[in-house]
Amino acid sequence: MAAADGQASPMGLGQKAWHEIVLQTLKRNDIRLVPYVPDRVLTRLIKDLHADPFFTTFPTAREEEAVGIVSGAWMGGMRGAVLMQTSGFATLANVLASLALPYQIPLIMFVSERGTLGEFNYGQSLVCRTMRPVLDSLAMEHHTATRIDEFEFIVDRSIKQAIATQAPVALILSPLLTGGKVFD
Amino acid sequence: MNSANTPSRNTKVMNRFDLTSRLVTKLKNEEAVVGGIGNTNFDLWAAGHRPQNFYMLGSMGLAFPIALGVALAQPDRRVFALEGDGSLLMQLGCLSTIATLKPKNLTMVVMDNGVYQITGAQPTPAAASTDLMAVAIGCGLTDSTWAADEEDFERLIDRSLTVSEPMLIGVRIDDKPGTGTTRRDPVQIRERFMLGLGVREAP
């Protein structure tokens, strides 16, 4: 039986899983507020965030709603990050261009990447192709995480850069990192 | 009985600027106020700038989510959100999120004129058929009420300053445009707001 979606095993003993790295790095950077629109790949991370009283985490109806919430919280002195999947990111062009970027809000996004490396839904693969062009057209910082050995560095440095420069960042979680969602 | 196209409401048609001014006059404890896109924040600006005001220049529909974020970050500060009916229609799901989280310090006001005033006063899809307070109650925001008139609005605002659950106040308003125009400088708006909330220190 294959490993559950998104829960790819670490490379060796003692190596942390990607979702453990996300949770610990959020905590180390005092990011307490984590609204999300769920994805299968994010299941374990969401479960662990709910189980940890350090975090205030809850589902929202839409991704832009979550962006609004963490933007308000940041202005009120509380750091946040938003979890979503690729198709959710595709709903965000307006709020990125009219809230996060012009108001210089350090919006931190984790995007579980659907639509590539074994996608089984054509619509998902098409919407995935809009993601990086939207990020590039807005000149937004983004990284695609593919390797567990680089992951903590990418997450930690990207969070610190977003806050220091008051600029949004998108961290795209590749199936190469997470195992992705498997067709069965 | 009213005609089939007109919901039977006994609420007075009021004015956005007048109501916003009445609200602002009551704020004595550095309460935060988030003004939604367009006329809603224009009238908040025109009512007299306060350091604790935030003005949206885009992101239609996000006044309540932004205010929720402020309320979660600063649970000891009362937070008000002013939103238009057309804007709220874009983000009805946030009513469920707020009902579930039950912030003790969030008061929401819907300015309902039934039209997209700023784009030419076209009717919203809800204007002829939807009771937004009934929608909110259905979402779990049980303390959701239409204000009957200005005096009732002030009574509801007074009550909201003391309650410990989220409250939504609906006001029917006329189709007048905003009274002023917010200075469109997003970074300055955000920085002043953070100073007003005590998150930033004055240079």
Image (tube, helix red, strand yellow):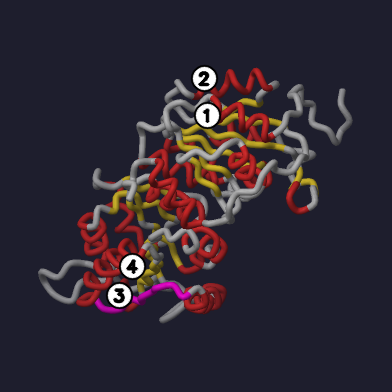
User: x%, y% of residue B189?
Assistant: 49, 51
The answer for how far apart the CA atoms under marks 1 and 4 are is: 40 Å
Pointer 2 local density, CA inside 10 Å: few below 14, some 14–19, many at least 20: few
Q: Chain of mark 2?
A: B
- The chain that hosts pointer 4 is A
Gap in Å between the C-alphas at discs 2 and 3?
A: 52 Å
Which residue lies at the image location 73% right of the left edge and 50% below the top edge? B118
Dots 1, 3 in contact, CB < 8 A: no
Q: Residues within 10 Å of mark 4 (few under 14, many from 20)?
A: many
For the residues bearing labels 1 and 2, Cβ distance under 8 angstroms: yes
Residue B35, image quadrant: top right
Residue on which disc 4 sits: A6
Q: Are marks 4 and 2 in contact (CB under 8 Å)?
A: no
In this view, the mark in front (1 or 3): 1
Which residue sits at x=76%, y=28%? Answer: B13
Q: Amino acid at mark 1?
A: Met
Marks 1,4: beta carbons within 8 A: no
- Quarter of the view holding residue B142: top right
Q: Residues within 10 Å of mark 3 (few under 14, many from 20)?
A: many
Q: Which residue is the site of mark 2?
A: B159
Chain label for disc 3: A
Q: Is residue B23 left or right of residue A48?
A: right
Label for residue B167? 1
Q: Which residue is mark 3?
A: A177
Q: Amino acid type of disc 2?
A: Arg
Magenta residues, start to end: A139-147
- Chain of residue at mark 1: B
Tag in front: 1 or 4: 1
Residue B199: percent from left, percent from top: 33, 45
How far, Cα to Cα, is label 1 from label 3? 44 Å
